[in-house]
Amino acid sequence: MNNIKLAWKNLTNKPLNMMLSLVLFALGVGMISMIFLIENQVQEKFDKNLAGISLVIGAKGSPLQMILCNMYHVDDPTGNVKIKDVKPFLSGRNPLIDKAIPLSLGDSYKGFRIVGTTQDYLGLYDVKTAQGKIWKENFEANIGADVAKIANLKIGDTFYSTHGFLSDGMNGHEHGQFKVVGIFQKSNSVIDQLILTTTQSIWEVHDNHDHEEKALTENATDSHEVHDHDHAHDHDHEGHDHAPPQKPIIEEVDQEITSILIKFKESSKKSFQALTMLRGINENTEVMAASPAIELNRLYDNMSLGESFLRNLAMIIVFVSGLSIFISLFSSLRDRKYELALMRVMGATPTKLFFLIILEGLLLAVIGYVIGIILSHLGMSVFAGQMEDKYHYSFTAAKFLKEEFYLLGGALFIGFVAAVIPAYQAFRTDISQTLTES
Amino acid sequence: MLQTKNLKFSYDGKNYLDFPDINCQRGEQWLLLGQSGSGKTTLLHLLGGLRKPRQGEIMINGENTNQLSSTALDQFRGKNIGIVFQKPYFVRALTVEENLMLAQELAGQDIDKDYIFKLLNQLNVGHKFKSKTENLSEGEKQRVSIARALVNRPTVILADEPTSALDDKNCHEVIRLLEQQSKEANATLLIVTHDGRLKELIKNQIEL
């Protein structure tokens, strides 16, 4: 029988003592690991979706809200801006700007946001279609992989948009009818959760909505297009049948969009003008600019307050669990002093007894660690489910981090430290004295 | 063979216990008699290498155990000396069988399950080999601890008041078993006791 087996039998002989230490230890490890997992995945999501965007321009309000809404699609829009107010950014004449991508938000289907934008948007996230093609005409839509799966949409399916972001469609009259023309590959970016279409589709939906008009019909023909095109110049746009994008977005000066995502040119990213642009916009114009990097740092700072509280709490729990391992080993040693003396009589060296007790501490730590990791990943799968329901953001419980591996080192250290004093006591067992004490 | 010469021990460095010289040949059975407090258990611990004497020598199988290093003494004790204590101690987390296996292992011997079963059967506790030791009766515990003392085929068996807690019937039984087993193993048996009942059973006697 080796030491491990003997240590195991000693531990399981007093299951209640063991349980308390294990529960505490598992709780502490589980909390720390869970914090790691959430922090890691939230940051990964945020960072991945940063997508090289340097600035977001939109209506005045909370800059963080604007970032969260337009880049991460988790908050409501701050409002809309008129094209004429943001024309200089969209014109393509600004030498600093590589890409300026307009976003129009406000509608959804089954809780998935419909985003009116240009095809440049896809370039940010480097996504490809898994099936079908990229949208071109108004009311053609491309859907993210998760949308396809959860809303059960296929190429050629049509659906009506709902006003607002709520999945129950409570404030939704049925809006425009969209047709799925393409489904994206899973990219683990926000695109997975979005329905993309032209900016003009969003405008049309809203214009038509006011007039209770019907949405796109299958037989929108080329002649319509021409017809519409003519009228678009003469009349207000409202009240006409849907058609492919007519005028360039930038000419629809009175229409509104939610925001513009700005990507600077590589060469000008760090330039003085680029760095001062944010302040310039906020001080001199009617719109607001925000830097995702700055806002996210602010968000992380706020998160880290709560995080460090939780982390400290977890540390305290781990410390207490270490103490509980110490106490349980120490008290079990008092019960077991005769058998330790007996083992010495039978030929065990003091060193052997020392390592036996150390091993008991380490075993407790390892088992506690394993239970803790299982708990944290179970917790993570619950959390992932909630995030998926609430924000359509997918997290995974199946991912293991190298920090969790380091945690094992920490756990072993605590198990060792907790066992050292009891082990030393066992080491010093005076056989004769112990056996005559009885 | 178990011999001592000029053995002296002191707990405090002032009051010395002087022990008479002992000379027990291999295969003999001896009683070590004395009143409580006369140093019987101390002597047994000295003989068993659980304590070191202040002075004198202890020869077991020609080895002066007083001069062994502590690790060597641990090994020597495990292999050559079987001790039956007044109270039967066991590793409680283990079964009867596992306790005996542990004794073999700690002494650095190969595990010999057949011998373990043979011993337990001879001592009439063969059916208890899978039991936890705390579920045994006092008599059974004492017999299992005798089995443990014998499991490494020691040359010296030391027994500390093995019968003090037992009734007459069990007392005779335990002594009979100890005698029988030590004869079979050709080991020296030394029983330390103040139990007058044993005087009639074992002829070789030392008074403290």
Image: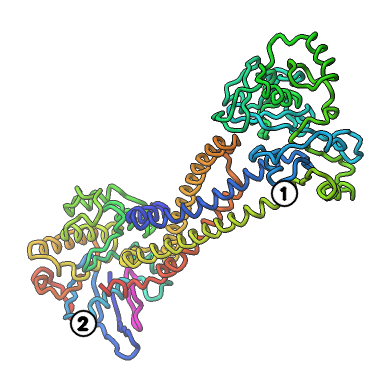
Q: Amino acid at mark 1?
A: Glu
Q: Position of residue A369 (x, y in %)?
A: 49, 51
Answer with the quarter of the image where residue A243 lies.
top right
Residue drawn at (39%, 69%) of the image: B73
Answer with the quarter of the image where residue B188 lies.
bottom left
> Magenta residues?
B50-62
Q: In this orientation, does residue A269 appear?
A: yes
Q: Are marks 2 and 1 in contact (CB under 8 Å)?
A: no
Q: Position of residue A423 (x, y in %)?
A: 43, 66
Q: Nearer the viewer, residue A214 or A426?
A: A214
Residue drawn at (60%, 45%) of the image: A401
Residue picked out by circle 2: B37
Residue drawn at (29%, 71%) of the image: A435
Quadrant where the C terminus of chain A sits is: bottom left
Quick check: is A419 in the magenta stretch? Answer: no
Identify the chain of the residue marked 2, using the numbered disc in the image.
B
Query: Dot 2: within a 10 Å radius of its alpha carbon, few (fewer than 14), some, or many (20 or more) residues?
Result: few
Count of number-bearing discs: 2
Image position of A25 (left or right of A98): left
Q: Nearer the viewer, mark 2 or mark 1?
A: 1
Q: Nearer the viewer, residue A346 or A219?
A: A219
Is the residue A67 above or below the residue A6 in the image?
above
Q: Amino acid at mark 2?
A: Gly
Residue picked out by circle 1: A295
Identify the chain of the residue marked 1, using the numbered disc in the image.
A
Is the residue B3 above or below the residue B177 in the image?
below
Q: Position of residue A193 (x, y in %)?
A: 64, 31
Q: Nearer the viewer, residue A149 or B204?
A: A149
Residue drawn at (78%, 11%) of the image: A224
Chosen colour scheme: rainbow
